[in-house]
Image: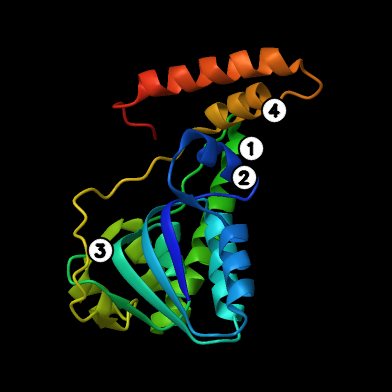
C-alpha cells in the first residue's frame, strides 16, 4: 500500500483549513487512517515535504514506528524540518536528486523577560526531542545532532546516507524531479481568522458564505507572495 506524505505537516485541527485553501498537506489522522487500512501489510511511504508542525510530525513519526507491518520510507523530493524526523521512522531510501534539511525548532513569544526565558527553555527542550529521532536513527550523540540542527544543515542524498539519516540511495524509478523546496505554512493569525470566519458558531449561514468568499478572494489576491 502507498501512503504519501506531501506538502505541509499540519495538526488534525488545522487540516480542514489547508484543505479548504487547496494547499497540499498531511496530518497525523491521514497517516493513521491509511495505516489502519493497510492492516499490517507492507507499506511504502513517499515523502516530499518542507515540514510544518513539530508535534504533528512527532505524531506521524510515532504512528509509523508503531506499525506492525513492514514500512519502507522513500524521500522523493525534500524531507525538511518535521518531515526529516518522519524520514527517520524506519528503513529508508532517497532519490539521488532529493535532499534533507534539519534545523532548530521555531516559535514566537510576546511578553516580559520571564516569558522570553521560558519560551527559550521550551524551544531547547523541543530541539532535544527532535534530536532524539536523529540519535535513534544514526547512533550519533545528542551533541552532534543538536550541532547539526544549530547549523541548519542541508544534506544531499549522499550526505544523508553518509550521516546515517537515510539507509541508501534509491534505484532509478523514473521519478519526477522537484525544482522547488518550500512549503506554505499559514500564519496562526490566518488560521484563527479562517476558523472564526468560515465556521462561526451560531452565525447565519448566508453571512458565513459571504465571509467565506471574501476570505478566499483575499487569499487568491495574496498568491504569488511568500507566506512564512
The spot of residue 208 in percent (x, y) is 67, 18
In this view, the mark in front (4 or 3): 4
- Spatial CA distance of label 4 from label 3 is 38 Å
Q: How far apart, in angstroms, are the residues tagged by discs 2 and 4?
A: 33 Å
Q: Where is residue 134 in the image (x, y as percent from the top left)?
A: 43, 73
Question: Does label 2 or label 3 sit earlier along the sequence?
Answer: 3
Indicate whether 209 appears above or below 27. Answer: above
Residue under label 2: 118
For marks 2 and 4 on the same chain, the one whose residue lies earlier in the sequence: 2
Marks 2, 4: nearer the viewer: 4
Indicate which disc, 4 or 3, sits on the residue closer to the N terminus: 3
Tags 2 and 1 touching, CB below 8 Å: yes
The residue labelled by disc 3 is 99
Secondary element under disc 2, as helix, strand or loop, is helix
Residue with the mark numbered 1: 114
Closest to the observer: 134 or 174?
174
Amino acid at each position: 500500500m502507498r501512503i504519501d506524505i506531501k506538502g505541509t505537516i499540519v495538526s488534525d485541527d488545522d487540516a480542514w483549513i489547508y484543505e479548504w485553501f487547496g494547499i497540499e498537506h498531511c496530518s497525523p489522522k491521514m497517516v493513521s487512517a491509511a495505516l489502519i487500512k493497510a492492516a499490517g501489510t507492507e507499506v511504502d511511504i513517499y515523502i516530499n515535504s518542507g515540514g510544518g508542525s513539530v508535534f504533528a510530525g512527532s505524531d506521524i513519526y510515532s504512528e509509523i514506528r508503531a506499525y506492525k507491518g513492514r514500512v519502507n520510507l522513500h524521500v522523493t523530493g525534500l524531507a525538511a524540518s518535521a518531515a526529516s524526523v518522519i524520514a527517520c521512522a524506519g528503513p529508508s531510501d532517497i532519490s539521488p536528486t532529493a535532499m534533507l534539511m534539519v534545523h532548530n525548532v521555531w516559535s514566537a513569544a510576546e511578553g516580559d523577560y520571564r516569558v522570553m526565558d521560558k519560551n527559550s527553555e521550551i524551544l531547547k527542550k523541543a530541539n532535544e526531542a527532535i534530536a532524539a529521532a536523529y540519535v535513534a536513527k544514526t547512533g550519533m550523540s545528542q551533541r552532534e545532532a543538536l550541532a547539526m540542527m544549530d547549523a541548519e544543515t542541508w544534506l544531499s542524498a549522499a550526505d544523508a546516507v553518509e550521516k546515517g539519516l537515510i539507509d541508501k540511495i534509491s534505484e532509478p524509478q523514473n521519478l519526477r524531479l522537484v525544482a522547488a523546496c518550500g512549503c506554505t505554512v499559514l500564519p496562526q493569525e490566518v488560521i484563527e481568522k479562517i476558523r472564526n470566519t468560515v465556521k462561526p458558531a451560531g452565525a447565519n449561514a448566508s453571512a458565513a458564505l459571504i465571509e467565506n468568499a471574501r476570505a478566499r478572494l483575499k487569499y487568491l489576491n495574496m498568491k504569488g507572495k511568500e507566506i512564512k
